[in-house]
Amino acid sequence: MNIIDTLVQGILLGGLYALFAAGLSIVFGIMRLVNLAHGDLIIFAAFAILTITSMFGLNPFVSALIAAPLMFAAGWLLQYFLLNRTLGKDILPPLLVTFGLSIIIQNGLLEGFAADSRRVPLGSLEAATIPLGAVNIGVMPLLTFLSAIVVIVGLNTLIYRAPIGRAFRATSDDPVTAGLMGIRPQRIFATATGLAMVVVTVAALYLGTRANFDPSAGPSRLIYAFEAVIIGGLGSLWGTLAGGVVLGVAQTIGATINPEWQILAGHIAFLAVLAFKPRGFFPRAVD
Amino acid sequence: MTLLQTHALTARYGDFQALFGIDITLEAGETVAVIGANGAGKTTLMRAISGVLASAPEQILFEGQPIGALASPDIVTRGIAMVPEGRKLFPSLTVEENLLIGAYGTKGSGAWNLARIYDLFPILKERRHSPGTALSGGQQQMVAIGRALMSNPKVLLCDEISLGLAPVVIKDIYAAFPQIKASGASIVIVEQDIGHALKVADRVYCMMEGRITLSGRSSEVSREAIHAAYFGAGVHEHH
């Protein structure tokens, strides 16, 4: 009974990690860009939601709806004017620039919001649960998991069904030939990062309402995102959910044994997957 | 009416100069062949016209407008589409998606759409859900030609479409050209295969070492003149 509860909590926690990972995954999948500032952008979005919520007295879900287009625009501009200049044969410039960006975002947030731990208030929904047989399921963890599924289905539909998704994949394959089709790779990349920032906003909503966060919380979120992407297999969005669930379950099991082992157990699960399936569970066939 | 014109077009890759003042013209409705040996500069010429390589604005005129400095997405939007050397299909896309993406930069309709491309190359309809790169070389070339036609170009640039294909397959592909011409497109064919080039082209330019060494109507240029222009006068076949 207790083990079922642990598993369910772990699986639902995996939804949050999948949301962390999905944005990282599409940016890497389309541009081969490893965004080391991804975790800090999640924290940045969480502060944006917090600010909108407290400033206008809005429900955090409404605040996230307002933050999403702003984050899309910020991502578009960031990619178009900064990150596009780092893309090329050399893989080092994007790493250096996004690492610098990570420091800038952390210190900017520290300057603007101080080092205090914050939380997006959600009222009675925070503790609401649904009794489901033997286990009680938290409404917010359930919503997090369902949102992860909706985000992944939505992204897959966009990438594999919509014209813009064809352009994403074609540009990812060969930007020069994509140009011959009338595609402007620079704008396609900007749109992809904008889209990733919308996913980041969704992740930030659930992160910010679930747990405390502060300006320095980004890098550990980046680690979870990386681990989920790699466990799932590079390039597969459903893989990020699988990776998130593996991490989440490992962490809740670890925490049940000993609360100090929660984080460690996640990393050990990651290393175990890396040792036995170095390419993850669902690596993309092409590549 | 002159549709496309290059004027003293030059191109270089770093220190290496690939084109030395190329002047060619393409009239509306015409098919022109550019022939020459490997390394003559034919592909460079196609890359310059299609905007992959930047040139000085006035070095390339299209419908009287300078287009030399435009990037490739602007060139295809204006009506010049390219079938690139080596086909360059997108491996992540199916055959049908490869065709559809050809129309990405152009709005509105014209003679060519998915149904017309499938009429032209029926085998592609059968294979439409396969990954583009799972097809045979000849079928991939059909996809590359169809993809370029999907933008309903005024000018179709075909770079080495017979390269690496069996003669019978080349014949199948060239059999599509009368229909492409009939749709109103003007065509530039870059070839090493002189026989096929002369058969479909109204006029021919021969290139060697980055220069035009011969030009004339396909029916009027002699094999001897082409041979001299292709390999250089005075060079013997036996070394």
Image (spheres, helix red, strand yellow):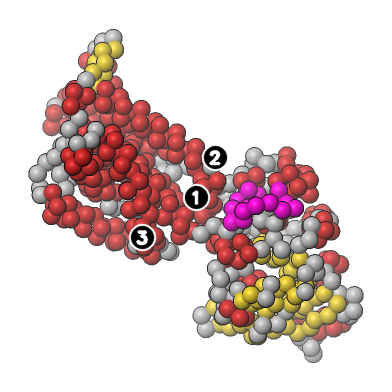
Q: Earlier in the sequence, mark 3 or mark 2?
A: 3
Q: Alpha carbon of mark 3 to alpha carbon of mark 1: how far?
A: 17 Å
At label 3, counting other C-alpha atoms closer than 10 Å, the crowd grade (few under 14, some 14-19, many 20 or more) is many
| Residue at mark 1 | A168
As for residue B105 lying within the magenta part, the answer is: yes
Figure check: A181 above or below A151: below
Q: Which of marks 3 and 1 is nearer the N terminus?
A: 3
Majority secondary structure in the magenta region = loop
Residue A217 as seen in the image, left or right of residue B183 = left
B180, B121: nearer the viewer: B180
Figure check: A178 above or below B43: above
Q: For the magenta stretch, what is the residue range?
A: B98-113
| Residue at mark 2 | A161
Q: Residue at position x 42%, y 38% from top?
A: A237
Where is residue A92 drawn, in percent x and y? 34, 62
Q: Which chain carries label 1?
A: A
Figure check: B212 above or below A147: below
Assign the N terminus of chain A to one quadrant of the image: top left
Marks 2 and 1 share the same chain = yes
